[in-house]
Image (tube, rainbow, N blue to C red):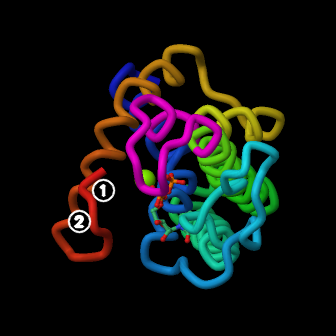
Amino acid sequence: MGSLSSLIWAFWYILPAYFANASPVLVGGGRPIDGGRTWRDGRRLFGDGKTWRGLIGGVSIGTLVGVVQYRLTPSFYGDFRTAVLLAFLLSFGALLGDLVGSFFKRRADLPRGAPAIGLDQLGFLISALALAYPVKTLSSGQIIFLLVVSPFVHWGANYFAYKMGWKSVPW
Ligand code: CTP
Ligand code: MG
């Protein structure tokens, strides 16, 4: 594997996590995961920006991306079950990391939608990589590559969603 193709494979590997993290902007809404409940500091547990529809929709879309990826590059995954399990863990991991990030944002008294540089761009990625680790792993070089490019992908996707009128702030 050449170094360029190894970076492209890293991008291919993480794609379900990107889709899972981005799709709640379109499919989310409705009942918040915390059901309106507050933590002992009196502030919301996660806030209105984390909904069941966003979580379930995002995990479903990310997992479907894995199904398509298997059809396109079956040898990268070995078998269908591995591809789908990997996509599910990457997607669920991404949205779990996003949820944990919101928990800490609320503890820091940041309102819903307030930017938290670093946490917003990398929390979902680290959590996705951690959950998917037992199924299929990247090299440390590939992981560093994803840590470097993901914030730019995140900002680019959010700016696009803002320009499309899907969200009210460009971050
Ligand atoms: N979203 C959702 N459910 C999720 C995650 C996201 O419905 N589990 C939707 C919400 O409409 C949210 C939007 O996607 O406003 C953008 O997601 P994100 O930027 O993660 O949420 P924020 O509104 O910025 O909230 P927070 O400050 O908690 O990060
Ligand atoms: Mg946000």
| Residue 110 painted magenta | yes
Q: Quadrant of residue 117?
A: top left
Question: Looking at the image, which is closer to me, 66 or 1?
Answer: 66
- State yes or no: Cβ of the residue under disc 1 lies below 8 Å from any atom of ligand 1: yes
> How many numbered circles does the render carry?
2
The x, y position of residue 6, in whole percent, is: 45, 28
User: Which residue is the extreme one toward the top?
Assistant: 140
Q: Quadrant of residue 130?
A: top right
**Left or right of 119, for residue 60:** right
Image mark for residue 87: none
Question: Answer yes or no: do the residues labelled 1 and 2 have beta carbons within 8 Å?
Answer: yes
> Does 29 sit above or below residue 10?
below
Q: Residue at 56% of width from left, 56% of height from top?
A: 16
SS for tag 2? helix
User: Which residue is pictured at 29% across the width and 45% down the height?
Assistant: 155
* x then y, percent, for residue 140: 58, 15
> Where does residue 22 sit, x and y in percent of width and height?
45, 61
Q: Residue at x 75, y 57 (%)?
A: 38
Q: Please give the residue where the numbered disc 2 appears in the rendered image.
A: 162
Q: Callout 2: few (<14), some (14-19), or many (20+) C-alpha neighbours within 10 Å?
A: some
**Residue matched to label 1:** 158
Give the magenta-colored segment's residue range.
106-124
Amino acid identity at mark 1: Asn
Q: Residue at x 74, y 51 (%)?
A: 89
Q: Nearer the viewer, residue 9 or 152?
A: 152
